[in-house]
Image: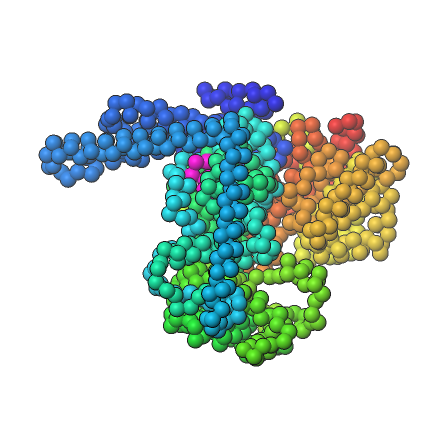
Amino acid sequence: MANKTQQVAGIHFPFPFTPYSIQKDFMAELYQVLEAGKIGIFESPTGTGKSLSLICGALSWLRDFEQKKRQEEARLLETGTVPLNAGKDQPPSLASSCQETPDTLRPAGEPDWVTQFVQKKEERELVDRLKEERVRRKKREERLRHIRHNAQLKYAAKRVRQEEEETERLLRLSREMLAAGTGAEQLEQLASGEEELVLAEYESDEEKGTASGVDEDEDDLEEEHVTKIYYCSRTHSQLAQFVHEVQKSPFGKDTRLVSLGSRQNLCVNEDVKNLGSVQLINDRCVEMQRSKHERKSEAEEEKPKRRRQEPRAACPFYNYEQLQLLRDEVLVEVKDIEQLVTLGKEAQACPYYGSRFAIPAAQLVVLPYQMLLHAATRQAAGIRLQGQVVVIDEAHNLIDTITGIHSAEVSGSQLCQAHSQLLQYMERYGKRLKAKNLMYIKQILYLLEKLVTVLGGNIKQNPNTQSLSQTGTELKTINDFLFLSQIDNINLFKVRRYCEKSMVSRKLFGFTERYGAVLTPSREQPRLAGFQHFLQSLQPGGTKAPAAPIEEEAARALRPASPLMHIEGFLAALTAANQDGRVILSRRGNLSQSSLKFLLLNPAVPFAQVVKECRAVVIAGGTMQPVSDFREQLLACAGAEAERVVEFSCGHVIPPDNILPLVICSGPSNQQLEFTYQKRELPQMMLETGRILCNLCNVVPGGVVCFFPSYEYQRQVHAHWDESGLLARLAVRKKIFQEPKRANQVEQVLMEYSKCIQCCGQAGGTVTGALLLSVVGGKMSEGINFSDDLGRCVVMVGMPYPNIKSPELQEKMAYLDQTLPRTPGQAPPGKALVENLCMKAVNQSIGRAIRHQKDFASIVLLDQRYARPPVLAKLPAWIRDRVEVKATFGPALAAMRKFHRERSGPS
């Protein structure tokens, strides 16, 4: 792909081909946002090359930033002095080191010679630091150059690793043989492997940190964090697509890119990966690193142990030299997650830690939403946002994403299971635990009991058979919930810290794994048979016969994590500020089905740290309208000044005549179209919708995608059409497909839908294509491309307002009404939220059709409420500017017929 460098406003933007004018505007605006340290909201419709614009615009800025920084460093090192105007015309990375002038730091009346001496000392320190940075940078560049141009180094290192592994294996066998010989006379009070289930001594609440996974001799894996761009998106497939765009771009050969993922995605240790649950994989991995450090420290101690512990295995993929090589190979060439895992397997090194250690030197870090937006996850991954650039792509649902990440829900069944397991654990190992461990376990048991009680249940009874006298939904502030539950006297911050440090949920899971499958209890385990029976009775299906080996393996793969792991998340959420969250108590038929849910009301709280620390933040998407939510609910509440926020929205690359957006207010029989909750289930409304589709299918070639507000309404309409004969009339022109509820069936339906349209286009005949009945917010309203003949017409039935009776939505509306100022002449913030949620869903769905410059499609909005100016204003600009409102159906159908007849040739 040829590199065609573009010059826009004096800035050179390398690009793989001649960009559209809107791409040039996008890159220029992005460059200025990053240079000025602002927050940008960027909207670029799907099909306009948004990813390439982000890549080339952001990396062009980073290229210039690094060049300016090196020039300034060279000047400082050459002169050895800092200019008096330091901080005005320098890169921020240098300016921040020397912004404090003597006037702001020195007391008034201080002698000049003292001021000059202190200033000279600061200048020398800055120069020394710059020299160190330059030496480190040159070492890294030389190391990467060697790896890039000398493949023999890689294979030599691989041979050394294999030899070391063989030596380590022999040493391990020798130690096991010696241990078996010398330890026979010692009394084993616990069964083999059970020692690791006992909680280690908990030192103190103030003690900081746990094993980080890096040995003292591995410190040089950590480097200074260079200025970089963090790019995040919703799914791993979107991230992989972005990485492939980087690989194809002019920056693909020279950019140090790191793809981050969870342990579940990156782990190459099959024993750990087979645990299935994300939480279990995380805990087991950390435990193996801790095991490695404990064994190392034990080897250094000479004093004898009171009791021999069975050694736990350290991960064979976690080794300094292996990780060092993998880190460098990650930086040498751009790789996505799958390529990183393949490389880790070849190098016998952990991709999870290898990619983490590559973060400091990386220029572009690609990662999922959760890893960037959740502070604890961010810290664990070694991500530092201070002075960095963050780009959040596919950000139309950013507020909901932040809310979801920081919300938590637990069921009555989970609370009872966790209490039973922890009680049995304490009875089994209580005499071996230190006082502080026992104290915290009793506190957790107390919390679990009170949480069951507040739902109206009894912790001592089976939750599946416990009927609740009071049912319904109740909503409480955090403080009111703590008082109601009688747990306001417990320090939840200390309990949270204890759970994190002691890994009690992991120990508890190991305990239930060990004794949940006991068939014949031994002499030492008389109570565990009853424990097993009780655990089985807590499962929704009650007690079951032992599974066959193959079924057992499948069940193990799908096995949920310890219920205490889920409950830890809920307890942690309760430490939020009282005004920022609510607790929803849902009491249903029995205790097992009832639940407690923490709802985060203020997503700006976790996002504030991103806004505060980052040099610049870019929030981008294909359909960002309406942007008022981002400005008011997120950015303003997170502390961003209004003048720091910049909006950019570009048109589409298609010619204006290639799109026909219509608002249709009435149907063929003059039935007014208003799909409110009260009217949409009326037979005449459902019949009128069918008649409209019959007419549209007669004039639209190829595929028609019709979106309904919900799965239930789609089912009702389909059944009514079937009874009335309308379904048969529709089938004359289009083969009918329905969006499946199950995600694993979506691909099959899409394949059949696509194949049908392709065959009809070639064969001719009465059937001219296919009709796909979809659901707003479903599997096909986001991320699916209905380009060309797959989506010649998109129909939106009604306005997909969220359920206004939802307790969560009602509380969110009340919260916004109380906290956000009301703009004169506009709807209250709570009502505006409902309107915005509806229109965001509409914009996402109707954006499925136009996917490239030569594409064309019609968009039909079936509801007279779309004709209101405030609603039209929330459509994307490229649609809003072309929309036509049709009061009656005849002119609408004529416009549709004309539009598609003129474009019925090859697209």
Foreground: 545 or 12?
545
Q: Position of residue 734 (x, y in %)?
A: 83, 42
Q: Position of residue 222 (x, y in %)?
A: 40, 41
Q: Residue at x 62, y 28 (%)?
A: 653
Q: Position of residue 522 (x, y in %)?
A: 58, 77
Using residue 818 as the reference point, say whether residue 112 is left or right of it.
left
Q: How many marks?
A: 0
Using residue 607 as the reference point, say whether residue 835 is left or right of it.
right
Does the magenta run of residues contain 406?
A: no
Does the magenta run of residues contain 361?
A: yes
From this view, report whether residue 379 is shown above or below residue 112: below
From this view, report whether residue 345 is shown above or below residue 403: above
Foreground: 591 or 560?
560
Q: Residue at x 79, y 27 (%)?
A: 905
From this view, report whether residue 126 is shown above or below residue 504: above
Residue 733 visible from this viewpoint: yes
Q: Which color scheme is applied?
A: rainbow
Foreground: 319 or 223?
319
- The C terminus: image quadrant: top right
- The N terminus: image quadrant: top right
Given the current orientation, which residue lies at the most extreme right position? 765
The segment highlighted magenta reads 355-362
Using residue 471 as the reference point, say whether residue 719 is left or right of it.
right
Residue 239 visible from this viewpoint: no
Name the quadrant containing residue 553.
bottom right
Q: Residue at x 56, y 27 (%)?
A: 249
Q: Residue at x 25, y 25 (%)?
A: 80
Foreground: 808 or 758?
758
Q: Position of residue 549 (x, y in %)?
A: 70, 63
Using residue 774 as the reference point, say whether residue 320 is left or right of it.
left
